[in-house]
Image: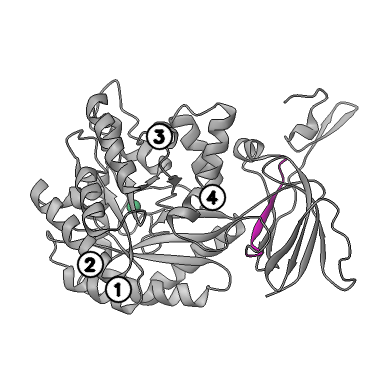
């Protein structure tokens, strides 16, 4: 834990501020902090934006960076991705899993993401993926918080992996996962939800299920998830990931469902990059977008977060684990280009996932952990527009990553220009 004085930042609310971190925690934040000890390390943020670190609330560290192994996903569908992962899974070794996950975590840190909720497959013949991810979690814990979810990728009942899932929880995995829409029948999907919620309740754990990742409007496992959440008393401790069938549901049923979700205080985790890529694949035209109704859910008062889900794996060939890219995609797909809507998208990769993941001491207020990112942008909307350099990434008052400011130098005849694409470049003032 370290001390650090960061002077001259602008905060998300547009206010100028300094930030003093002592013993790894924010000890003061506000304009013109005085009486800072002389030997403390100082960062001059030069008026750039400081935010709490980005959070990825839905990822798969065990599958990441495996693109093309053993072959690429030709159809681009979710189902071919699942079957490809099934081919790859028996061949992976502990060291490969660790190397790929560690590489991805280094990318995350460089992008200013300091917490990841990662699902880890427990439906194979062994728990090598769990063991590897627990190893990475422990090794990198000073730099990035990894929260693991026991995820029965091939279906809890369909693959018969209940004992593996329980073993994973005993080994230290802290969230119960599920995938009810991939079970053989609707009834088995409901049974899997019941079993998994009971396990979570007994062990005092959180729940995060891949739920209704489908274009089928009749995929309604979220309904059962809300009921079981209430029945076993997990209110506020359960998240539904994807929920893409809600995109295709009729409005009347949606209006009933949203009240059930509010009653159970379900967290919503959408995955815009992956949902726009995988959903609608069976459509001709018009093609559905497939993203769950994030704007409406936010307006109703649900906590909505965005996850990256995949980077270069059987389901998605692109990505560099940049949560600003995720939020940028979301605001396009969800028609959220209003100013307050874009701010909501920024919160969906910062404050909202912190709440859903029950992270403690998150934020830029006195007493919070000294974790933050300084971006080469003047406000969150500019950050969404530019996906700019992460100038400083700070964990517990320690600078753990730096990036040079981006600057293009033009020579147009005799005229020379330096461009950073921020509003500083404008010769006129816009709001
Ligand atoms: Fe996922």
Which residue corresponds to mark 1?
Answer: 169
Q: Earlier in the sequence, mark 1 or mark 4?
A: 1
For image coordinates 56% across by 64% down, the residue present is 106
Q: Position of residue 158 (x, y in %)?
A: 12, 59
Q: Is residue 375 magenta?
A: yes
Count neighbours of disc 3 (C-alpha within 10 A) and say few if under 14, some if 14 to 19, many if 20 or more. few
Count of residue discs? 4
Q: Earlier in the sequence, mark 3 or mark 1?
A: 1
Question: For the residues marked 2 and 3, what is the alpha-carbon distance in whole angstroms?
Answer: 29 Å
Count neighbours of disc 2 (C-alpha within 10 A) and say few if under 14, some if 14 to 19, many if 20 or more. some
- Foreground: disc 2 or disc 3: 3
- Foreground: disc 1 or disc 4: 4
Q: Is mark 3 within 8 Å of ligand 1?
A: no
Question: For the residues marked 1 and 4, what is the alpha-carbon distance in whole angstroms?
Answer: 27 Å
Seen from the viewer's position, the closer of residues 346 and 194 is: 194
Which residue corresponds to mark 3?
Answer: 300
Which structural element holds mark 4?
helix
Image quadrant in which you'd find residue 383: top right
Seen from the viewer's position, the closer of residues 89 and 369 is: 369
On-image quarter of the N terminus: bottom right
Which residue corresponds to mark 4?
Answer: 351
Q: Which residues are magenta?
A: 369-378
For image coordinates 44% across by 37% down, the residue present is 298
- Position of 13 with respect to 340 (left or right) is right
172 lies above or below 314:
below
Which residue corresponds to mark 2?
Answer: 199
- Position of 175 with respect to 52 (left or right) is left
């Amino acid at each position: 834990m370290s001390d650090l004085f960061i002077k001259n930042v602008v905060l998300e609310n547009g206010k100028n501020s300094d930030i003093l971190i002592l013993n790894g925690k924010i000890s003061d934040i506000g304009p013109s902090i005085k009486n800072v000890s002389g030997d403390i390390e100082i960062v001059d943020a030069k008026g750039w934006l400081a935010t709490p670190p980005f959070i990825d609330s839905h990822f798969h560290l065990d599958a990441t960076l495996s693109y093309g192994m053993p072959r690429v996903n030709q159809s681009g569908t979710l189902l071919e991705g699942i079957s490809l992962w099934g081919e790859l899974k028996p061949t992976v070794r502990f060291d490969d899993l660790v190397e790929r996950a560690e590489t991805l975590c280094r990318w995350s840190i460089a992008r200013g993401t300091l917490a990841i909720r990662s699902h880890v497959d427990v439906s194979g013949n062994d728990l090598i993926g769990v063991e590897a991810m627990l190893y990475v979690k422990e090794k990198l814990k000073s730099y990035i918080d990894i929260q693991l979810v026991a995820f029965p990728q091939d279906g809890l009942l369909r693959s018969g992996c209940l004992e593996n899932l329980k073993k994973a929880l005993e080994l230290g995995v802290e969230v119960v996962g599920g995938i009810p829409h991939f079970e053989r029948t609707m009834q088995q999907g409901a049974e899997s939800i019941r079993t998994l919620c009971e396990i979570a309740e007994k062990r005092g754990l959180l729940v995060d299920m891949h739920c209704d990742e489908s274009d089928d409007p009749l995929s309604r496992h979220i309904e059962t998830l809300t009921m079981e959440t209430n029945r076993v008393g997990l209110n506020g401790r359960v998240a539904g990931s994807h929920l893409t069938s809600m995109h295709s549901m009729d409005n009347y049923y949606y209006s009933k469902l949203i009240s059930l979700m509010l009653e159970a205080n379900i967290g919503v985790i959408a995955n815009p990059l992956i949902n726009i890529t995988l959903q609608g694949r069976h459509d001709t035209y018009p093609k559905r977008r497939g993203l769950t109704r994030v704007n409406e859910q936010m307006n109703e008062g649900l906590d909505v977060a965005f996850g990256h889900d995949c980077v270069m794996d059987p389901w998605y060939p692109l990505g560099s684990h940049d949560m600003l890219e995720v939020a940028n995609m979301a605001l396009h797909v969800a028609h959220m280009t209003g100013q307050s809507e874009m701010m909501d998208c920024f919160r969906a990769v910062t404050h909202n996932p912190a709440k859903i993941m029950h992270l403690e001491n998150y934020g830029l207020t006195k007493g919070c952990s000294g974790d933050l990112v300084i971006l080469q942008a003047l406000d969150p909307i500019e950050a969404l527009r530019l996906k700019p350099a992460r100038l400083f990434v700070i964990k517990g008052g320690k600078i753990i990553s730096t990036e040079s400011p981006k600057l293009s130098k033009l020579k147009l005849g005799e005229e020379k220009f330096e461009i950073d694409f921020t509003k500083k470049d404008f010769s006129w003032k816009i709001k």
